[in-house]
Image (cartoon, rainbow, N blue to C red):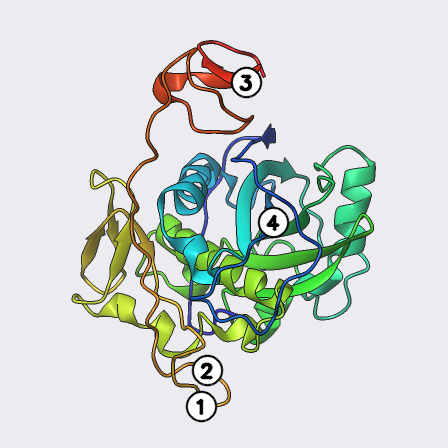
Amino acid sequence: MVTRKIVLGLAFLTGVVLLTGACSSDATSVDTAMDETESATTPTTFGLHVVWLKGEGEANRPALDAFVDYLLEDTNLTSYWGGAANIVHRSTTVVAAPSTIPSCGSPCSPHNTGPWLTKLINAKELPAPLPGEVPIYEILVDHTVTKGTVLSQSGVGGENGIGTVAGHRAGLFFATTNTDHFWSGRKPLADETIVTEHELAENVNLLLGRAHGGLIGDGVCQFPTCSPDRALGVGPTSITTGDGCGHTVKGWLVQPLAKSSDQWNGVSPTTCTFILKNTPPPAPKKCGSTTCATGDFCWGGTKCCDGTCKPGCPC
């Protein structure tokens, strides 16, 4: 849960974009006692579905999509779980904004959003979870428009939990798009990237049954962005992001995470030793020559079709 004042926001675009990612083996169980440095032979695949509410900040959807793709494919984030987790960006969707999220309770917590999301799936307004995957649904919300969420009650910029969506055990999290209420010193996208990284990492940790669950981004992990020697950025150096404290980073603004080896005070971590970093790009596959699986990286805008990288394939 994000416990400091945090932001996100703006407005544009509608519709559904389905995305594909690298293939991996599926798993139904994970050794919950495994430390982040150990390796799992069969990772659990998590399918991330990003849900924007119309009129509540969806102008930043293309930019956040680019960040999420980079976060999952070109940083060391998934190494945090030592091979136990594979996260794939499956879809991004804009749906009609409800005045309140139905059947969600008061205050509405993310773990109670399953019935509403299931109704959207049944109405073909939202992509369903894929077989063999654990779905995660991120809901970007302005709590002053869609009222009654835990964000307005608790004064936090994001919160996550576990629920049921379309019959599947699912990760669920809110991220705020209300810039002014949380951290007006930052541009909206800076908080969108931090909150997405933070809540996604905590949600995966919860779903894997890790001991500290939804605390790995809390405590001192949230505050280094105000220190010029600790503000973290990932992504293209052509992107410059302000941290809201008078400093800038190259790339998108992110934060460190706590590992099981870090000190804990029973509530939040006291050190945060996992630092998000850019990773080298994958070796390009030559068009039409090297075999590949659907979703594999192919060079120069080619796609993997019929087992080889080819230009202009509609798969």
Q: Earlier in the sequence, mark 2 or mark 4?
A: 4
- Is the C-beta separation of discs 3 and 4 under 8 Å? no
* Within-10-Å neighbours for mark 4: few <14, some 14–19, many 20+: many
Q: Which residue is mark 2?
A: 268
Q: Position of residue 250 (x, y in %)?
A: 21, 48
Q: Position of residue 198 (x, y in %)?
A: 46, 62
Q: Quadrant of the C terminus?
A: top right
Q: Position of residue 124 (x, y in %)?
A: 77, 32
Q: Nearer the viewer, mark 3 or mark 4?
A: 3
Dividing the picture into quadrants, the one containing residue 230 is bottom left
Q: Secondary structure at mark 3?
A: loop
Q: Residue at x 46, y 67 (%)?
A: 36
* Within-10-Å neighbours for mark 3: few <14, some 14–19, many 20+: some
Q: Residue at x 19, y 55 (%)?
A: 248
Dividing the picture into quadrants, the one containing residue 281 is top left
Q: Which residue is mark 1?
A: 265
CA separation, marks 2 and 3?
A: 47 Å
- Is the C-beta separation of discs 2 and 3 under 8 Å? no
CA separation, marks 2 and 1?
A: 6 Å
Q: Which residue is mark 3?
A: 307
CA separation, marks 3 and 4?
A: 24 Å
Q: Earlier in the sequence, mark 3 or mark 4?
A: 4
Q: Position of residue 179 (x, y in %)?
A: 42, 56
Q: Earlier in the sequence, mark 2 or mark 3?
A: 2
| Residue 58: assigned label | none
Left or right of residue 103: residue 6: left
CA separation, marks 2 and 4?
A: 25 Å
CA separation, marks 1 and 4?
A: 30 Å
